[in-house]
Amino acid sequence: MLLLECPYCGIAAEETELAPGGEAHLKRFGPKSSDDEFESYMFARKNPKGVHFERWRHAYGCGKWFLAARCTATLEVFGTYPAQVGAPPPEIVAKIKARRPGWSPE
Amino acid sequence: MSDPVSALGHAAFDGFARIREIGPLGMITLRARADLPALPAAVRAATGLDLPAVRRIVTAGDRSIGWMSPDEWLIVLPYPQVAQTLARLSEALQGQHHLAADVSDARAVFRIEGARAGDVLMKLSPVDQARLEPGELRRTRAAQVACALWREGDGYTLVCFRSVAGYVMGLLTHSAQPGSEIFPA
C-alpha cells in the first residue's frame, strides 16, 4: 500500500484516495516546436528502476495536484511537495541523497 | 417557493449504530484565495464564524464552516438562512475574485450515531479513525464515492453528493448490520 502525504492538507493519503498523473517535471513543447521535441514530450518517459518523480492528485481529498519523489523498486517515498516548481526542491534532493548516495538529479 | 426535500426522505436504519439521513441542510461552497485580504472579515460578517485552520471545522450554534481545500470552504447552516448569508457574502466580497454558491440541494447528509459509529466508517473509508481529531473535517471516499465527514456529538456527520445518496445509504446500512461489528463487545 502506498501512502503519500498531501502537502496541502497534510493527510497521509492512501493510494486509493489519490489519482496518478504520470511523470513530473516534463518540459512542455507546444506549437512551433520541432516534431522531435513534441514527440519526446508527448511519448518519451523515463520509466526508471529507482528514484522517480511523479504527479499525483489528492482526488478524494482536497483535489490538488502535488508531486512525489519515490523509488519504483522499493516503493520507498522520499517526500512530497507542491506542484508549482520546475525541479525537485533542495530538501527533497537532500533526502534522496541521504538514502541513495550514488544518485544525483539530472 | 417550493418546499425543499431531503434526498431520501429521512431514511433511517438501526443496526449496531444508528444511521439517519437528515436534511435538508443549508450548504454554501465558498472559493477564494486564502490570502484575499477581505476574506476573514467577510466570512465573519456573513456567518459569525472565523475561517478554520487547515482541515478543521469550527462550529458555533447551528452554523459551521469547514476547510475543504486551500482555496475552498464549506459553510453549513440552517436551510432557510442560505439566501441571506449568500447575499451578505457577495456584498462583503464585492469586486474581489471569489465564488459563493448554494450547494444545499446538491448534497445529501447522514448522521451515524452510537458508541460504535466509528466501526461503520472504518469499513468504508481509508481513514484512521483513531487519528481523526475532534473538530477535524476529513474529505475522503465512502467505498466508491467522494464524501466528507467529521465528528459531531455522539457520532459522525457525513456529506456526499445527492446523486449518490441511495448508494451511500446502502453502504451505511450494510456496514451497520448487527453482528458485523469490527470490535464486538
Image (cartoon, helix red, strand yellow):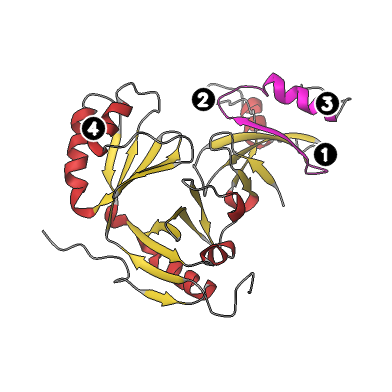
Q: Nearer the viewer, residue A19 or B179?
A: B179
Whether residue B128 can be seen here: no
Q: Which residue position holds label 3? A: A98
Residue A74, image quadrant: top right
Q: Amino acid at mark 4?
A: Ala
Q: Is residue B103 above or below residue A36?
A: below
Give the mark nearest the N terminus, 2 or 3. Answer: 2
Q: Which mark is residue A31?
A: 2
Give the mark nearest the N terminus, 1 or 2. Answer: 2
Q: Nearer the viewer, mark 3 or mark 4?
A: 4
Q: Amino acid at mark 1?
A: Lys
Is residue A79 rendered magenta in the image?
Answer: yes
| Separation of residues labelled 1 and 4 (CA atoms) | 55 Å
In magenta, the rendered stretch is: A72-99
Q: Which mark is residue B45?
A: 4
Mark 3: secondary structure: helix
| Separation of residues labelled 2 and 4 (CA atoms) | 48 Å
Q: Which residue position holds label 1? A: A49
| Separation of residues labelled 3 and 4 (CA atoms) | 50 Å
Identify the residue shown where x is 66% and y is 27%.
A36
